[in-house]
Amino acid sequence: MNMTHLGEVADAISKSDYFVALTGAGISKESNVPTFRGEDGLWRQYNAMELATPSAFAKNPSLVWEWYAWRQKLIGECEPNPAHKTLALWEQRGILKSLITQNVDGLHIRAGSKDVLEVHGDLWTVKCIACDHRERLQIAAVGIPSCPKCNNHLRPDVVWFGESLNPEIMKKVYAQLEQADTCMVIGTSALVQPAASFPLIVKRHSGIVIEINLEETVLTPVVDFHISGKAGEILPELDELLNKFR
Ligand code: APR
């Protein structure tokens, strides 16, 4: 770890007026939640087009629910890691103004983060395919859950490939990004739009972008700082350095 690098990043954060974070599956890797595109990523083992699209659900709802129930069971046994906890701490201290996540695992909220913009939805929330019913499951789904109001299928309230993101949430996301003078991008391959372009919005109004990732990504050439390593180790180290600025 290049400590000077971390020192510069801590300095940039301490000087920021509006610091936001964007996270991807990599921040949950150390909680044993599988990522999507790494060597053991979910999209290496499963075909996303058969499991995470509206047509896949229409064609075979029980297969799609089998896969999501498996993820709910798996994630139900995972705990937030030091990276999630550090972001929650930074929010409590007023350092982090907003947290935008692509993750649906709910670990940021379980770590204590309050203002979380879940742009790809939440694995535990389900919605009816026919009416406006929505509910949050407490345990993993069994079979295909039915709507208590109209008896149609309930589906995971997550954004599937080809679906648009929730306009209400997106309005809040863009408002945060427009205000941000510093954006930390943690654990995302930056391959899925529109989230992949969020950091570019901060860059466009001369904000600072910090990337924390095990490897370089398509974003790396345009970021101000790239810290290579595990989020669960780097964020607590950054927190220690930030404490020196307090
Ligand atoms: N610390 C930091 N980064 C890590 C760690 C770690 N411990 N482990 C893995 N990474 C990085 C990987 O190097 C990779 O760049 O996390 C990234 C994970 O990338 P993806 O698996 O593509 O996940 P993500 O970027 O969140 O995917 C975006 O794609 O399938 C859709 O909706 C799904 O939200 C998801 C979106």
Image (tube, rainbow, N blue to C red):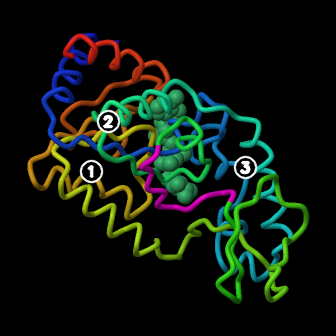
Q: Which quarter of the figure has residue 223?
A: top left
How packed mark 1 is, by other alpha carbons closer than 10 Å (few <14, some 14-19, many 20 or more), is many
**Would you say the magenta stretch is mainly helix, strand or loop?**
strand
Q: Does the residue at mark 1 contact the one at mark 3 (Cβ under 8 Å)? A: no
Residue name at image x 49 percent, y 29 percent: 85
Q: Is residue 48 above or below residue 218?
A: below
For marks 1 and 2, the one nearer the N-term is: 1
At mark 1, the secondary structure is helix
The residue under the point 90% across, 66% down is 143
Q: Earlier in the sequence, mark 2 or mark 3?
A: 3
Q: Identity of the amino acid at label 2? A: Glu
For residue 211, the mark is 2
Q: Is residue 115 magenta?
A: yes
Query: Mark 3 highlights which residue?
Result: 45
Which span of residues is magenta-colored?
A: 114-124
Which of 25 and 178 lies nearest the eye of the viewer?
A: 178
- Type of amino acid at the residue the image marks with label 1: Pro
Q: Position of residue 74 (x, y in %)?
A: 77, 42
Estimate the spatial distance between the alpha carbons at disc 2 and disc 3, rounded to whole Å: 27 Å
Q: Nearer the viewer, mark 1 or mark 3?
A: 1
Q: Do tag 1 and tag 2 residues touch (Cβ < 8 Å)?
A: yes
Check if residue 169 falls in the magenta segment: no
